Amino acid sequence: MTPLRAWLARHHEGEPVGVTSVCSAHPLVIEAAALQVKDGGGVLLVEATSNQVDQYGGYTGMRPADFAALVHGIVDRAGLPRERVVLGGDHLGPQRWRDLGPDEAMDRADALVTAYVRAGFTKIHLDCSAACAGDPVPLPGTLVAERAARLARTAEKAAAEVRADLGYVIGTEVPVPGGARETIESLTPTTPQAARATVAEHRAAFAEAGVDDAWERVIALVVQPGVEFDHVRVVDYAPAAARSLSEVVTEYPGLVFEAHSTDYQTRDGLAALVRDHWAVLKVGPGLTFALREALFALAAIEDELAGDRSGLVDKLEAAMLADPSWWAGYYDGDPDQQRLARRYSYSDRSRYYWPRPEVEAAVERLFHNLDTVGIPLPLLSQYLPDQYRRVRAGELSPTARALVIDHVRDVLREYAHACGEVAA
């Protein structure tokens, strides 16, 4: 039994526990998550999405084995035992190749899933909800389930080669990764009937595909609890609206709900989601949003001090303007509105630009500058007050890097509280 399945077994036994799914490839975010789990409890679940990481490199340039090596290197340096680490593959399916016909797209999806399993990923989200070229729109649920079962069969074959114990996630009502593009006013949770139909369709498809045994390893169902965020607002969880849906999962022993787009939910909202059986809480942009907050705060402190400037904020802006492909389809409005969105939007499209060499160099220069001169405590209080209190209490080093990581951990502390972990 994987550490994740063992942890979720406590939820099935009636404990209000869950797990935070960290959906980020940024090394500082992963380090923050590793330290949070090391100092707290539970398991570290880090997930890569199929657009981030694939057999060709994805937008990060990493293949599944590369991503696994990145995570393992970070957790080893953090001192977190690998047996408490779970790697997940998110949205694994034909989405990356939906402009192709379904046959070719699914062939590539088979290769994608195989690469993930061989690289040591044990939580596999089978997401075949995207229509390929020539497909009917929307896709019938039975066809989605048939394709997911095909990928499960592929994953089982790869798992047998590497002796892996997998856990599967299914679901056809899958939110858009990274938050909504359009302004949202409200959301309707998945209906209980739709949730039951998804389970029935997938179970039948698994049987038809000859992977009945794999069905026993389906651990979670993605449904919409009524949470989402766009560029400027958050739709908070309303337990009453999702009450009938939350009861459905109790009909399926061994199954929990998985909630996507939980970024920016309140502490109470996150805890209510776990209580209502959304025992896997996915968060991504909310973590890099906190990373950006801390880096911008340090850049503001740097501006108050003498010496050469890193120019971090300006260099990030220049990188986004030079290549608008990651934000132009998301941020509408006039130039001033777009500028604000590039810097401060909840959807945090700036996260795609931190790996750029010129931006990475600016971050390192910022850290060097501040660590060389030292951050005056009054300025730390002005810009990062929570970290100031921990520095004053002797709980946190006042180095720039440590301050950034701790600010990201402030988000993870909310999730740790909601998931029943001991927050550090």
Image (cartoon, helix red, strand yellow):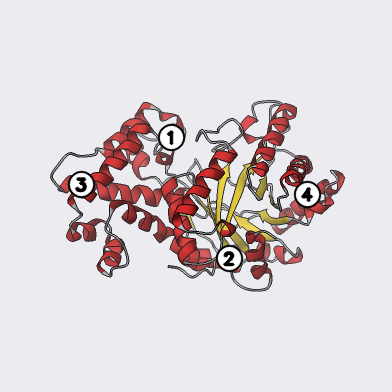
Q: Which residue is mark 2?
A: 274
Q: Amino acid at mark 1?
A: Trp
Q: Which residue is mark 3?
A: 302
Asked if one can make out residue 233 in the rendered structure from this viewpoint, the answer is no
Looking at the image, is 131 positioned above or below residue 159? above
SS of the residue under disc 4: helix
Q: Earlier in the sequence, mark 4 or mark 1?
A: 4
> How many other residues sit within 10 Å of disc 3, few (<14), some (14-19) or many (≥20)?
many
- 31 and 232: which is toward the camera: 31
Give residue 55's quadrant in the image. top right
The N terminus, quarter of image: bottom right
Q: Which residue is mark 1?
A: 327
Q: Amino acid at mark 4?
A: His
Which-is-in-front pick, marks 4 and 3?
A: 3
Give residue 91's quadrant in the image. top right
Q: Earlier in the sequence, mark 2 or mark 3?
A: 2
Query: Is there a contact, CB below 8 Å, between mark 4 and mark 1?
Result: no
Give how far across and how far down residue 11 sits, in percent: 64, 68
Using the numbered discs, state the Cα–Cα distance from disc 3 to disc 1 in whole angstroms: 27 Å
> How many other residues sit within 10 Å of disc 1, few (<14), some (14-19) or many (≥20)?
some
Asked if one can make out residue 282 in the rendered structure from this viewpoint, the answer is yes
The C terminus, quarter of image: bottom left
Q: Amino acid at mark 2?
A: Val
Give residue 86's quadrant in the image. bottom right
Q: Amino acid at mark 3?
A: Glu
Using the numbered discs, state the Cα–Cα distance from disc 4 to disc 1 in whole angstroms: 35 Å
Q: Earlier in the sequence, mark 2 or mark 4?
A: 4
SS of the residue under disc 2: helix
Using the numbered discs, state the Cα–Cα distance from disc 2 to disc 3 in whole angstroms: 40 Å
Q: Which residue is mark 4?
A: 202
